[in-house]
Image (cartoon, grey):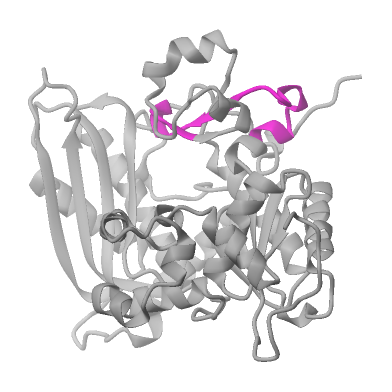
Amino acid sequence: MGCSGTYYFFSSKTLSMFAIVDCNNFYASCERLFQPQLEHRPIVVLSNNDGCVIARSNEAKALGIKMGAPAFEIQTLLEQHQVAVFSSNYALYGDLSHRVMQVLGRFTPAIEIYSIDEAFLDVAHFAFTDLSNYGSTIRAAVLQQVGIPTTIGMATSKTLAKAANRYAKKACKTTGVFVIDSEAKRQEVLEALPVEDVWGIGRKYQIWLDAHNIKTAWQLSNANLAWIQKKMGVVGLRLVKELQGIACYDLEEQPAAKQGIMTSRSFGHLISEKKLLQEAIATHATRCAEKLRKQDSCCALIQVFIHTNAYRKQDAQYHGVLSIPIPTATDSTSELIQLAMSALDHIYKPGFLYKKAGVYVSEIVPRSQVQLSLFSSKDRGKEKQLHDAMDKINTLMGRDKVRYAAAGISRKWKLRQEKKSPCYTTNVNELLRIKN
């Protein structure tokens, strides 16, 4: 059918049309944006502590570099092909993602930010527009205003739009847009999509479907609905209907509040000092509190864990974890730090080399629904004013410009980022400099 545009089709009963915009090789594209000499050169971005590959440019994929490959195992390949290697720079990626989403928001009355590099758009209002051309306009705007290349898929359901997006990356590399606007195009896309690559199909269902000779998304879309519902439940039934072009999921313009928040990091080097563990745990508790306040929530349970490196067989191994209930749900940084320090006191054991520590908060409720204690003497009003002021300062001046002393200053425990690029857009001291 090709990638040329036609007008919005399906039927008079069709009330929805979704587009999903996906930033191409997002982390690698962010790195290339400020270093144009890397154009056409293979790029990989590494995980925390420069451990494994978490992003690859198309050139790196062509070399056979796999997602998740340990950096030390492919070091020879990286050097042989002069692959540009970067530590993850989440401050840069997050800011560029925000800029992309701002541009996308100008093209639609409704947008769902699905991930750091993907967003669903409601394009049903453009029923009599050439949607392929409209998609090209969106791509051009993002590229011109932010510098990030994108691919766009459109269809009458979110699952089908995801399939169209995947198809566009392979079959429409020049235009970068594919619109499923006819039954023939729906069949074309779904016949080319392996069932394991359908959005929402996990390993367990893939094995089951494969055993019943359902190999492609097209075959799944034509499966007996009663049979699917019996095995896969309502979720499976909705998935099949979505593949048929029937929208079962609306845009989620306001993301649901998280029911659990985890903050953890591996250390840049193995540590045994309790003081360094305390600084790390205090920092993680701070992050959890900030995220709670951002979604206007409080938690009633905090869990702290520390563990050694299981891959170092020559070292003694230990995994410590402790959960503490909180009588009155809170979003207070000071309270969470105090509780986290208490938990660490109970689980810390000297003589071990620790690799990772983290804090997890759960039993999350909206701030407006917190049941206060009759016997508490804590002035929560003043504490809220303090944290609101701290959040505002840190938002304007940069993370941790104001922080609790328990989080430390030197932070010798921080993760290793030996190949981190500058924060070109978020740090005034690291702005791109143009030489005469």
Please name the residue shown 76% across and 76% down the image. Answer: 8
Quarter of the image with the N terminus is bottom right
Whole-percent x, y for residue 272 in the image:
19, 28
* Closer to the camera in the image, 54 or 312: 54
Whole-percent x, y for residue 119 in the image:
61, 62
**Does 44 lie within the magenta span?**
yes
Q: Is residue 23 left or right of residue 3?
A: left
Is residue 19 visible from the viewing direction of this image? no
Residue range (magenta) = 31-54
Whole-percent x, y for residue 365 in the image:
33, 78
* Closer to the camera in the image, 175 or 308: 175
* Closer to the camera in the image, 240 or 380: 240
Quarter of the image with the C terminus is top right
Is residue 50 visible from the viewing direction of this image? yes
* Closer to the camera in the image, 54 or 351: 54
Please name the residue shown 29% across and 77% down the image. Answer: 227
- Where residue 188 sits, quadrant-wise, is bottom right
Please name the residue shown 78% across and 69% down the image. Answer: 107
Q: Is residue 246 above or below residue 217?
A: below
| Identity of the residue furthest to the right in this view | 436
Please name the residue shown 8% across and 36% down the image. Answer: 349
Q: Is residue 55 left or right of residue 432?
A: left
Whole-percent x, y for residue 159 in the image:
52, 67
**Does 353 lie within the magenta span?**
no
